[in-house]
Image (cartoon, helix red, strand yellow):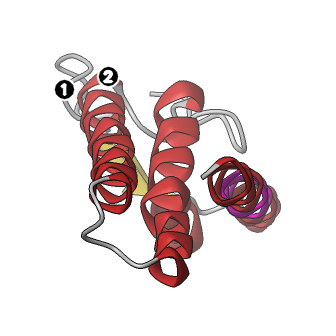
């Protein structure tokens, strides 16, 4: 298995898992909005929708890009479930590749937080 730094560090099985967690985050955000609309959640707590939005965006981007932020920070990769390759999981030994992975992980997290902030601001403004 040829590791490609800052492009892909997870296989199809891990991508599906992240996509499912992203959907879970969106469902949780929807539940918060519904609770507010039903009068069970004060307006001040509506800003709490930021957390599930952040989870949804972070994990959704990871699923889309095939890139795990946590694995990048640990200097690892996981292509298990992608076939019978003996090197399906392992560590990233090249320091330059690790640096690029960490930079890419940071970029994903910043984008996710920014998108969650915008989505939260829109929800609060509309409701």
Q: Which residues are magenta?
A: 107-116
User: Residue, x 54% and y 83% (percent of image)?
Assistant: 44
Vertical relation: 103 (above or below) 86: below
Label 2 crowd (10 A; few <14 / some 14-19 / many >=20) = some
In this view, the residue in front, 36 or 54, is: 36
Q: Residue at x 82, y 61 (%)?
A: 96
User: Could you say where residue 95 lies in the image, as x and y percent from the top left?
Assistant: 75, 68
Quadrant hosting residue 110: bottom right
The residues bearing labels 2 and 1 have C-alpha atoms spaced at a distance of 7 Å
Res 75 visible: no
Label 2 or label 1, whichever lies nearer to me, is 2
Q: Looking at this view, is 18 or 104 the one in front? A: 18
Q: Are marks 2 and 1 in contact (CB under 8 Å)?
A: yes
Question: Whole-percent x and y of residue 82?
Answer: 26, 20
Q: Which residue is mark 1?
A: 81
Look at 81% across and 62% down and name the residue there: 103
Query: Which numbered tag is attached to residue 112?
Result: none
Q: Is residue 115 rendered magenta in the image?
A: yes
The answer to which image quadrant residue 23 occupies is top left
Q: Considering the whole magenta stretch, tell me its main secondary structure.
A: helix
Q: In the depicted view, which residue is nearer to us: 93 or 117?
A: 117
- Location of residue 85 with respect to 50 vertically, above or below: above
Does residue 21 appear to the left or right of 33 in the view shown? left
Q: Is residue 65 magenta?
A: no
Number of marks in the rendered image: 2
Q: What residue is disc 2 on?
A: 12
Please state, as top left, top right, bottom left or bottom right, where the N terminus lies in the image: top left
Q: Secondary structure at mark 2?
A: helix
Q: Secondary structure at mark 1?
A: loop
Q: In the rendered view, would you say 49 is above or below 10?
A: below
Pointer 2 or 1: first along the chain: 2
């Amino acid at each position: 298995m040829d590791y490609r730094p800052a492009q892909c560090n997870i296989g199809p099985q891990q991508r599906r898992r992240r996509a499912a967690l992203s959907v879970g985050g969106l469902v949780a955000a929807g539940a918060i909005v519904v609770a507010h609309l039903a009068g069970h959640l004060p307006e001040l707590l509506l800003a709490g929708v930021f957390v599930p939005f952040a989870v949804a965006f972070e994990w959704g981007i990871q699923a889309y890009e095939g890139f795990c932020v946590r694995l990048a920070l640990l200097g690892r990769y996981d292509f298990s479930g992608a076939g019978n390759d003996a090197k399906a999981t392992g560590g990233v030994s090249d320091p330059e590749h690790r640096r690029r992975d960490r930079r890419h992980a940071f970029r994903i997290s910043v984008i996710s937080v920014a998108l969650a902030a915008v989505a939260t601001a829109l929800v609060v403004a509309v409701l």
